[in-house]
Image (cartoon, rainbow, N blue to C red):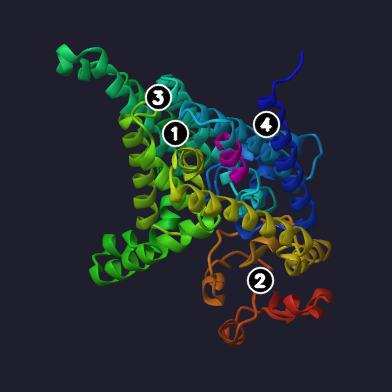
Amino acid sequence: MSLSRDQRVLGLFVLLASALRLALAFRVRVPSSDGAIYLWACEAIADGRFADGWSTVFHPGTALLVAPLVVIGVSSYVAFALVATIAAVFVIVGIDRICRSFECDATARIVATMLFVVGFHFVRLPADVYSEAFALPFVTWAIVAALRERWSMSAALAGCGFFVRPEAILVAVVPWLLSRSHDRRRNPEDATHAHRRAPGWTVLVICAVFVVSFALLRSWLTGGHALTPKLDFMLPLGPLGPLVEGNFSEFASRLGSNAFRIVPSIASGLDYGSGFLGLVGLVLLSKRTLAGAVVVRAMAVFVLLHVITLLAFETKPRFFLMLAPILLPCVGVLWMRLRGAMRQLGRGVIVTTLVVAFVRDAKDLIDPPRIEKRVELELGRQLAARGAKAGSMVSALPRVAWAAGQRPLPPWPWTAAELLQRVVEPKHRVLVMLATEDNLRAMIADPRGFHRIDVPVHASERGARIAVYER
């Protein structure tokens, strides 16, 4: 059976996206600090230690998806890169489907899909080992299902996304709003009764089942009682922490700081233009298409909820990637619907965005990020060879702990004083931290018998910035 032109183009995009992501991952071969924790959780679950895998500050969906490959002997980093690349294929197909729902022509669909294929942060996800790689397919297909009026499926996909990243559940607002509007259109003579039996209630119930199930499973395995473990970790980082404590001046300061970073974060996270172009495209969605005013409102509410959530905690470029399944197809809408002088200007900006993204990808392939941090992996392996047993190390550097087979601490700028508070048992025999003046001074003044040791990797510049203590 011969393939259509659209299928051939989509197949080429899949091959290009897969090649870029796998090539970069194998060039980097060093996870991010968060990534080291995800990989440790993958290995724990693959080893049958489910309680450990569920006990980190991050949701375990990523580890559950990657662990099967680790079980059969694939290294956790390679397994993550492979599965994350497969996940990207689902996003590519999903974005194409959303574009079709928006009645984009073939060229507009190509433009929107290419923005994901070569998008700088999207390409980096497998190499960085970030969970957005697996949250994005669930968010994308939840939107696809909602546009096809499959409300329950959309809600279930949002619930599955919650197991990967907590904010993925926000996409359930799209099927909830669309289902309510759909039911009212079908029953205009009895809006009150329609509201009571609207499918929107089904969406809410399904989402609640997933969230409660997650909390109960985590409570059973680890004893934790929070709906999401990430809340306790993220709360002190944003304005909500001071607000809970009654420190209103600090709350206002942090909220203002987050708000100030919103625009540059969206710009950086979505390749210096596609995020804002997508917002314009969202406004341009015509009522004559399936994506009418109701769909526009539902999509806009999801975008707004996501931004408000980030304002309450932290605003980083990577955190805005979750909006891509809406904003990138809307760039396709913009490409198709601009008229007059704005047509050439808008298309020029979109093409420039694609070129800049591809150049950044090429730069990463030529000069991979985090190469200097390979020394942390080597240090971890050396400490493991020295006999550091599981649970004997307390490290401020997650990569060192992971490479040594130890449980990494949450990604936090740990000080020596904070690390020493965690040394409460005789089994804690190794401390690893950044060699700042304050840290070195704290260790000299502490009477717990730690002495600094030298390891060969200290000969490197990065190695010299790491202090290792034994007792």
Mark 2 is on which residue type? Leu
Residue marked by disc 1: 216
Q: Is residue 193 visible?
A: no
Residue marked by disc 4: 10
Mark 4 lies on a secondary structure that is helix
Q: Calculate the distance from the C-alpha at mark 2 to the C-alpha at mark 4.
A: 50 Å
Q: Position of residue 58 (x, y in %)?
A: 53, 48
Residue 413 on the magenta segment: no
Q: Calculate the distance from the C-alpha at mark 3 to the C-alpha at mark 4.
A: 23 Å
Mark 3 is on which residue type? Leu
Residue shown at 44% from the left, 51% from the top: 341
Mark 1 lies on a secondary structure that is helix
Mark 4 is on which residue type? Leu
Q: Position of residue 212 (x, y in %)?
A: 40, 32
Left or right of 378, for residue 113: left
266 versus 147 height, above or below: below
**Residue nearest the observer in this picture, 280 or 72:** 280
